[in-house]
Amino acid sequence: MSITSQAELDGMKAISEAVGATLKQMRDYAQPGMSTQELDDFGGELLRQYGARSAPRLTYGFPGWTCISLNHEVAHGIPSRRKILQEGDLVNIDVSAELNGYWADNGGSFVLGPDLHGHQPLVDASRAILRKAIGQIKGGVRIAEIGRLIETEARKAGFRVIRNLVGHGVGRSLHEEPSEIPCFYDSHNTRRFKRHSVVAIETFISTRAAYAHATNDGWTLMTKDRSYVAQHEHTIVITDAEPLILTAANQLWG
């Protein structure tokens, strides 16, 4: 989507505030002993209060209001009453929704309670790399250069990137052009970010694996070697200077 009027910007701000605030409140609500279904139901009720509709449900028929992935799960985890949160879990919540014809996407990983298993450096790297990448995006910048930055920073921190999960355009639907904003450098990708366009920038930072793989439930993506991945995501509007972070209501993700 390209922002062409104040009304469009206001529409994007409204849905972005809804998903950002929902994500923040879900993180605050999560407690050991709670099922991911209970956490998802809480998120679904928050979206309802905003008048927003779950994007994965609308677009794909996903069996949850939000995606909640635990530990070795990378993305698209299905909420379940059988999945019980434990202290030290690596938790990822991805909230995307629609409101009045506008769509936004926001996600983040965190350690639940004490860092019993040493996941915090991975989480911190994913968040910091996203912040640095967003700071370099403006109209005319090559998409490939942002991928190079993300991959380089991940290596400096002792991690890798997931190569088959990417950021994307967003705004009038959940996934728009540019359809792929990778976390790695692709010399063949000559496309550039366009001023006034709306995109969801994501960092998928991994302890070892370079790819996520589908599981038997048809939704959840995992690493084959059981390595861990932390993801952070913001919806932004590209300008001639620093982008406008629309999902900034979710301050915890940086």
Image: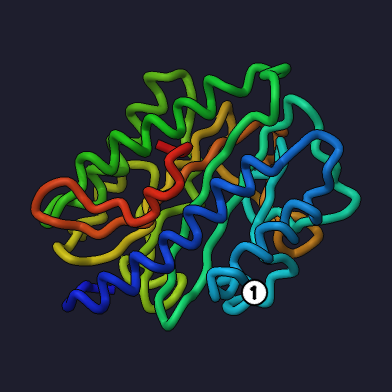
x, y (%) of residue 87?
Answer: 77, 27
x, y (%) of residue 21?
Answer: 50, 53
x, y (%) of residue 246?
Answer: 33, 56
Q: Secondary structure at mark 1?
A: helix
Give the residue at x 47% y 45%: 163
Give the residue at x 52% y 69%: 97
Residue toward you, 53 or 125: 53
Residue toward you, 190 or 67: 67
Direction from residue 56 to residue 128 in the image, left or right: left
Q: Most extreme residue toward the bottom, as rendered?
A: 101
Q: Most extreme residue toward the front, as rendered?
A: 49
Residue topped by disc 1: 57
Binning the other alpha carbons within 10 Å of mark 1 as few (below 14), some (14 to 19) or many (20 upward) gives: some
Q: Measured along the vertical axis of the image, is residue 223 above or below residue 142?
A: above
Give the residue at x 54% y 69%: 50
Dot 1 amino acid type? Arg
Q: Quadrant of residue 41?
A: bottom right
Quarter of the figure that contains the N terminus: bottom left
Direction from residue 245 to residue 71 in the image, left or right: right
x, y (%) of residue 130?
Answer: 37, 38
Q: Most extreme residue toward the right, as rendered?
A: 82
Quarter of the figure that contains the C terminus: top left
